[in-house]
Amino acid sequence: MRDVQERIERHIDTLSKFTSTPGRGTTRFTYSKEDLQARDYIKEKMKEYGLQVREDGIGNIFGKLEGTLKDAPSVLIGSHFDSVPNGGNYDGPAGVVAGLEVAALFSKNHIKPKYPLEVIAMVEEEGGRFGAGLMGSRGIVGLLSEDEFKQIKDKDGISTEEAMASIGLDSTLPKKRDPETIKAFLELHIEQGPILEDKNIPLGVVESIVGLTQLEVTVTGQAGHAGTTPMDRRHDALVTTAKIIAQLPELAIGEGTVITTGRLHVFPNGANVIPEKTEFSIDIRSSKEEDVLNVIQKVEELIESYNGHGLQTAVEQSLYVPPKAMNQEIMSLMKEKCDELKIEYSPIHSGAGHDAMVFADFTDVAMLFVPSKSGLSHCPEEWSDSSDIANAVSVLYEVVKRLTEVE
């Protein structure tokens, strides 16, 4: 598998160059120049490995190896290729690369499956540009309507349709896919945590994925002069926002429940102006749906309590996905193949959200994790060993052969 490992390293190295922040991590936003560069590379490799390439009306990329069974559903394998601001080289692309390498092994070994194999590279999983996480996968399964998609804009007011057109993508193409055309979805991802590395285990078989919600909060007050407005006459949106955010950790009720505010915009953002308005995000995650719902209620009550006395608060839920269990049969198959290949593995729970959780309500889904160095992710230091990714490719190759019923 040394040749596979070397190709993985070349893929990751090449994709890492498509960033708007060279030397400061990977910043590759959906429908950007860097997206187009990565997109062209992925499509080129798909064609090189004998796949028929197409893009849908949301910009997801599909590379298909036809099966011998007419109109049969496909086994999908892949991940996303967008990034967070100043992120790492592996979150997302490692899964796309794994899919490409499974296809490369099919091509090298002249395998013709019964059921089609499709390598998939999805957009806007992170929500880095449009704040609409899991957008590519939600579009595929129909959880994002045409009207909703058209209404999405980035922080500069550029719509999804305008952004797609800017890099030559056609937003009028179909977005939703008939679930009957999907037999299963497999995703490799870096762990983004320390468990596998601490155990010195090269693979994790994911058993469940955390539930998550994202709230968008607006606090509106009154702008004023920083020097001439007395403290008791102020309606400062930022001070109120700070009070709300400071209380959020106390609301993380339930084992493993976490709350994060990662994005904050202040208006008009002048050093000598009392902030008139703030917009900020709240990310809530837990392995139990009842805990997620309970925390959402408490957060909304907290925010509502600051409504009045010259201040207005508003909350919009931009994303909600309940916790998801992975398919037992495919998990068992993954473990069986790990044993046959003598690759050590550990059952693991995902504390991060993934496209796989969106597909889980529509088809059979399974995931593999590879270790993350020092548990770091969403930062330039993010790194996973190519030998671990190659091990995962070996397992996925055998699993995909079984699922596509290779004779």
Image (tube, rainbow, N blue to C red):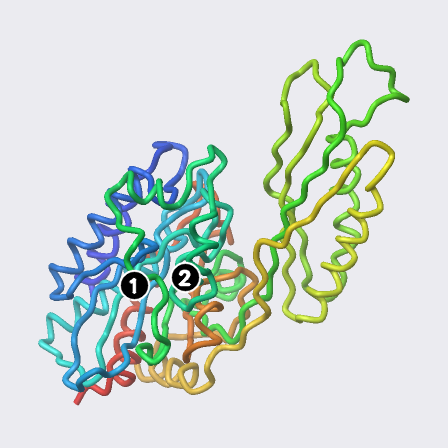
Q: Nearer the viewer, residue 200 or 81?
A: 81
User: What percent of the width, then of the height, locates residue 212?
Assistant: 60, 61
For disc 1, the marked residue is 120
Are circles 2 and 1 on residues that touch, CB within 8 Å?
no
> Which residue sits at x=64%, y=50%?
316
Q: Is residue 262 left or right of residue 232?
A: left
Q: Quadrant of the C terminus?
A: bottom left
> Which residue sits at x=78%, y=27%?
236
> Which residue sits at x=31%, y=51%?
171
For disc 2, the marked residue is 139
Q: Nearer the viewer, mark 2 or mark 1?
A: 2
Q: Quadrant of residue 100?
A: bottom left
Please tell me how crowded label 2 is: few (under 14), some (14-19), or many (20+) other residues with Cα within 10 Å. Answer: many
User: What percent of the width, then of the height, locates residue 347?
Assistant: 50, 75
Examine the rendered structure and indicate whether residue 100 appears above or below residue 382: below
Q: Amino acid at mark 1?
A: Ile
Does dot 2 land on a helix, a strand or a loop?
helix
Q: Quadrant of residue 281?
A: top right
User: What percent of the width, then of the height, locates residue 140?
Assistant: 38, 65
Q: Nearer the viewer, residue 41 or 182?
A: 182
Q: Nearer the viewer, residue 148 or 8?
A: 148
Q: Quadrant of the N terminus?
A: bottom left
Examine the rendered structure and indicate whether residue 43 appears above or below residue 399: above
Q: Amino acid at mark 2?
A: Gly
Q: What's the CA distance linking mark 2 and mark 1? A: 13 Å
Q: Quadrant of residue 211?
A: bottom right
> Which residue sits at x=33%, y=77%?
182
